[in-house]
Image (cartoon, rainbow, N blue to C red):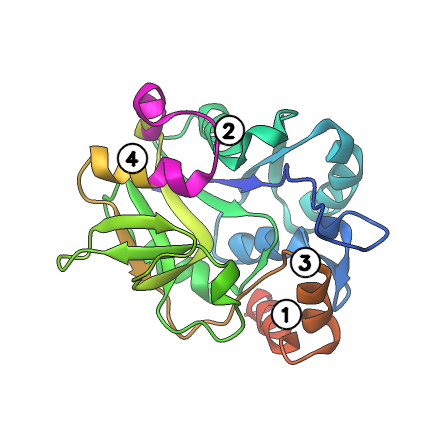
Amino acid sequence: MLRRAVVLAAGLGERFRGSEHKLLARISGHHLIEYPIRSIAAAGISRFLVVTNSILLEKLSRVVTELERELGLEVGFVINDDVEKGNARSLLLGLASSREPVSLVTVADHVYPSTLVARLVRGYGEAPLAIAGDREPVHVDIAEATLVKVSESGVIERIGKNLDRWDYVDTGLHVVSASLLDYVERCGSEGEMSALYECFSRSTRGSVVVDVTGDVWKDVDTWEDYLRLVEGRNGVVALRAIESWRV
């Protein structure tokens, strides 16, 4: 049973040209960091751990404290000041602090509706790792995306960028077993989360992709991504997310 979500929010956002860190940028009246938290809360999870760095902690905590009061959430923070070592480190710190047998894990800079969360929660089963994957993403630059290749039986084989062949695009929302922590020595604790996932998938059995094709979503890596959400053709993604919170 999923009882806690881990939000990975320790990145420096160096490709974003706004005056604030990108997670504090507003989209349709809400800070970017609010989108994954609100969508997950609307899907029924109320306990969160936000993995961030010391520089961002104070500003993010202000936003999150308001969400706690408004939505009745329980939110804690975990500090990762070794951001240069990759997001795998944030993931492992979050899982260790969660102390749950399985956690929902999300990157903090993706916008998606609560329906996407609900589909992953319904479909992950007993998998040690389940990635919410999209076969036909509409609002995402494939050249920048994390791609997933699965076997004929649906088990994850490859995860990463610039794969020659792929079946899904990673939406940035995952269900991860705490057993991943047992593979740190074999798989490493630094570098990209996708490499850690690939190693873990090869070392265990049953890691899968849950198909969420049809739900709109968008990653915000750059200033241009942000502008497309605020004033461009990707604006529908934010609106769909907001609508899903009200259901």
Number of other residues with Cα within 10 Å of mark 1, as a class: few under 14, some 14 to 19, many 20 or more: many
Compared to residue 188, the image places residue 122 above or below, namely below
Q: Residue at x 76, y 45 (%)?
A: 63
**What type is the residue that disc 3 sits on?**
Thr
- Is tag 4's residue or tag 2's residue first in the polypeptide sequence? 2
Question: Which residue has dot 3 on it?
Answer: 222
Mark pair 2, 3: CA separation: 22 Å
Marks 1 and 4: which is nearer the front?
A: 4
* Residue 131, image x, y percentages: 36, 52
Residue 92 located left or right of residue 148: right
* Residue extending farthest left: 153
SS majority, magenta: helix
Residue type at mark 1? Ala
Which stretch appears magenta? Answer: 180-197
Picture residue at 61% right of the left edge, 78% below the top: 236
Hey, which quadrant is residue 50 in on the image? top right
Q: Nearer the viewer, mark 1 or mark 2?
A: 2
Tag 1's secondary structure?
helix
Q: Which residue bears the numbered disc 2?
A: 89
- SS of the residue under disc 4: helix
Q: Position of residue 68 (x, y in %)?
A: 68, 43
Q: Residues within 10 Å of mark 3 (few under 14, many from 20)?
A: some
**Depth check, front residue: 14 or 101:** 14
Residue occupied by mark 4: 200
Secondary structure under tag 3 reads loop
Q: What residue sits right under mark 1 in the picture?
A: 238
Q: Mark 1 or mark 3, which is nearer to you?
A: 3
Contact? badges 4 and 2 (CB < 8 Å): no
Tell me if label 1 and label 3 are in contact, CB under 8 Å. no
